[in-house]
Image: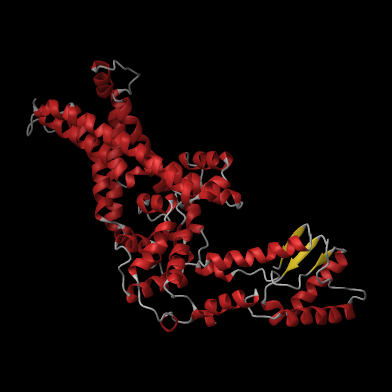
């Protein structure tokens, strides 16, 4: 088996497995531990507060947006691109069509996908600079805060190289594709294993605090 | 104020890592674990904190920074020294008053105050507790109120207040232990001790409003709960239970608390 086939085959399966199973474990652990040690959440559970808090924080209608508009706008755009580009990229959908699953769905226009990729990478660089230059951020940041930002941005950067042949003069197209797949797999694996687990835990943390704050009549 | 005593003189015992972990472990629920794991260190909480804003933006006052102690203690399995815990003490008592404003602005809704409260409880378990609060808690345990007012003093104060207030509003009464009253009124124990005027003012309002109210003579009349501030859940529970017990005995419909 060639390196390419290994990275595109078994390693991809493995990283998807870690991603999915890891997140399921995260969710099950939260539910199990909370049922024993956070009983208050169940005693006062109320979908009204929970759904309201999801709506307010998934959309820019919360006090933090009003207080820090520029930064939060970038955060929303960052997350939007992060979710949309990999799923609706033509090049990815073709792979799904050719796979055993034979799945297909509408793709983003190339130009828009390119634009979103560039915007995403630019914001990632801004976030990295913000973290490295601000006195407050530097104090709070650990190695993993920097590393995870880079890990999240790498699939976009390498994906851009693949699409545009930026590094064709230095590396073969195959090598760049392998690097791109590896970077994507690394990000997938890191999601359940790091703070990136907020991918699902966001909903549990926000929901839990909404239950506690809602019952006291605070803003959720 | 007495509360500002250094913990040094009030914490004679040695730090016991096993004891710290035995105390903390059962309390680290799903929320604490999640919050410690997902905090993105984005610093959006920084300028929501009045301690940060009023300390020329001292980065150590960033709420997300203040709870690093919880993560560190768990990581070190409780193996920390006295000097470390004194640093924790300084932060959790004098650099956070658990107002929860940071949580209102945290995109993840991380409840910093709840973590600070857990740290206070942990320190309490190691005997590190502000002297003023320690005394108050002893008083609650012994007398049911934070100022150690005896039942005789309490009833005597009410009767004296009634006498004074009725000189101004003829016919005014302060009903004690009136079964079936609509409202059971509770006070801050500092009122009978230092500010009986407050009790008189309230009695006048109730009288003029024509309310059916009463004061309990037995413990449960102090509605402050200082045990809560040091994370002493057992005493905090006892204080609340006393009030509920009195309300049930007197068969009142409502419990009102002082301002």
Q: Nearer the viewer, residue B38 or A90?
A: B38
Q: Nearer the viewer, residue B177 or A106?
A: B177
The answer to whether B183 appears left or right of B245 in the picture is right
Residue B250 against residue A189 in the figure, above or below: below
Q: Looking at the image, which residue is at 8% across and 32% down?
A: A171
Residue A135 against residue B193 in the figure, above or below: above
The answer to whether A29 appears left or right of A5 in the picture is right
The colour mode here is secondary structure
What is the x, y in percent for residue B219? 69, 72
Residue A111 appears in which quarter of the rendering? top left
The answer to whether A124 appears left or right of A167 in the picture is right
Residue closest to the far bottom: B9
Residue A110 appears in which quarter of the rendering? top left
Is residue B139 at least partly visible in the picture? yes
What is the x, y in percent for residue A164? 18, 28
What is the x, y in percent for residue A69? 44, 48
The answer to whether A117 appears left or right of A40 in the picture is left
Q: Looking at the image, which residue is at 29% across and 63% down?
A: B76
Residue B237 appears in which quarter of the rendering? bottom right
Residue A157 against residue B165 in the figure, above or below: above
Is residue A220 at least partly visible in the picture? no
Tell me the quarter of the image containing the N terminus of chain A.
Answer: top left
What is the x, y in percent for residue B4? 49, 80
């Amino acid at each position: 088996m060639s390196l390419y086939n290994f990275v595109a085959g078994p390693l991809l399966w493995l990283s998807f497995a870690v991603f999915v199973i890891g997140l399921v474990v995260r969710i099950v652990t939260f539910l199990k531990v909370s049922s024993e040690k956070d009983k208050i959440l169940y005693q006062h559970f109320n979908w009204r507060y929970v759904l309201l808090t999801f709506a307010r924080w998934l959309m820019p209608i919360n006090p933090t947006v009003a207080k820090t508009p520029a930064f939060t706008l970038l955060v929303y755009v960052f997350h939007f691109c992060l979710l949309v580009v990999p799923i609706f990229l033509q090049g990815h959908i073709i792979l799904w069509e050719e796979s055993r699953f034979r799945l297909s769905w509408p793709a983003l226009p190339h130009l828009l996908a390119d634009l979103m990729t560039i915007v995403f990478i630019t914001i990632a660089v801004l976030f990295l600079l913000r973290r490295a230059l601000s006195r407050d951020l530097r104090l709070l940041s650990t190695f993993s805060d920097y590393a995870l930002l880079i890990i999240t941005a790498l699939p976009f950067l390498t994906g851009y190289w693949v699409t545009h042949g930026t590094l064709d003069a230095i590396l073969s197209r195959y090598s760049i594709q392998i690097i791109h797949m590896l970077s994507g797999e690394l990000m997938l694996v890191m999601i359940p294993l790091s703070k990136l687990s907020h991918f699902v835990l966001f909903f549990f943390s926000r929901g839990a605090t909404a239950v506690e704050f809602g019952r006291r009549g605070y803003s959720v | 104020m007495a509360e500002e005593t250094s913990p040094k003189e009030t914490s004679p015992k040695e730090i016991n890592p096993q004891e710290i972990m035995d105390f903390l472990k059962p309390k680290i629920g799903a929320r604490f674990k999640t919050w410690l794991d997902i905090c993105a260190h984005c610093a959006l909480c920084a300028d929501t904190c009045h301690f940060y804003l009023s300390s020329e933006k001292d980065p150590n006052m960033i709420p997300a920074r203040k709870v690093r102690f919880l993560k560190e203690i768990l990581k070190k399995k409780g193996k920390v020294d006295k000097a470390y815990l004194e640093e924790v003490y300084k932060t959790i008592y004098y650099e956070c008053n658990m107002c929860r404003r940071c949580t209102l602005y945290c995109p993840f809704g991380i409840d910093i105050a709840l973590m600070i409260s857990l740290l206070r409880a942990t320190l309490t378990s190691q005997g590190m507790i502000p002297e003023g609060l320690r005394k108050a808690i002893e008083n609650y345990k012994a007398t049911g109120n934070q100022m150690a007012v005896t039942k005789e003093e309490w009833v005597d104060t009410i009767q004296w207040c009634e006498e004074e207030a009725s000189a101004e509003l003829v016919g005014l009464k302060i009903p004690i232990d009136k079964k079936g009253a609509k409202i059971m009124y509770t006070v801050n124990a500092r009122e009978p001790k230092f500010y009986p005027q407050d009790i008189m003012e309230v009695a006048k309002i109730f009288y003029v409003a024509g309310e059916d109210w009463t004061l309990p003579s037995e413990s449960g009349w102090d509605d402050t709960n200082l045990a809560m501030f040091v994370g002493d859940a057992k005493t905090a529970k006892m204080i609340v239970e006393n009030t509920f017990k009195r309300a049930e005995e007197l068969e009142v419909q409502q419990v009102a608390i002082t301002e």
